[in-house]
Image (spheres, rainbow, N blue to C red):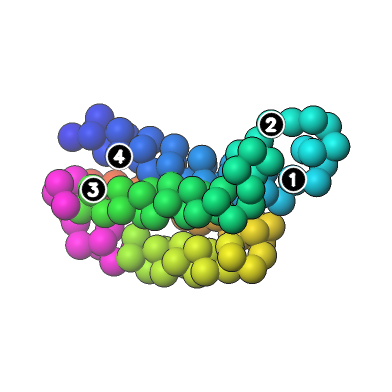
Amino acid sequence: NKMEAVGMLFICSFLANISREIMKDIDDIKGDKEMGSSTLPIIYGEKKSLLISQIFLLSGMVTTFLPYVYNIFGVQYLFMISVLNIFVFWTLYISKKNVSRAEKSLKIEMYGVLFVFFVSKIIDQIA
């Protein structure tokens, strides 16, 4: 049960972090071009890269519900992660207009997922 929770947290974090790194590359495209880097936005363009980033982020969001689906955490987890995912949807929305702001928001939301995992674990041990 513990390993399943850790595995799900790892997958969620991995997907969200890839999304965030692509957003950072989009934000840094000018400097990366000057340095001769071969980042995703340079190779495929900003629009396609943003779409790839959003797909990774949506995939990460889906994985946040797995601990509830597999009965690792209870309804309190479902509530907290659902509220947090509202902010992640907002990040998806603003990423089209302001990738720098979205990248920074996503970083905070990733900490939020960790917080929800830890609080849910504590609540489950108390209950």
Q: Is residue 87 left or right of residue 64?
A: right
Q: Position of residue 20 (x, y in %)?
A: 56, 47
The reply to whether residue 106 is visible in this rendering is yes
Name the residue that disc number 2 marks.
38
On residue 67, the disc is 3
Q: In which quarter of the image is residue 33?
A: top right
Name the residue that disc number 4 marks.
8
Task: State which mark lies toward you, 3 or 2.
Answer: 2
Is residue 77 in the magenta section?
A: yes
Name the residue that disc number 1 marks.
29
Q: Using the numbered discs, state the Cα–Cα distance from disc 2 to disc 4 in whole angstroms.
A: 31 Å
The amino acid marked with disc number 2 is Ser
Q: Position of residue 48 (x, y in %)?
A: 55, 51
The amino acid marked with disc number 3 is Pro
Q: Which residue appears at 58% of the width and 62% of the height?
A: 95
Q: Do residues under tags 3 and 4 come within 8 Å of each other at their CB atoms?
A: yes
Q: Using the numbered discs, state the Cα–Cα distance from disc 1 to disc 4 in whole angstroms.
A: 32 Å
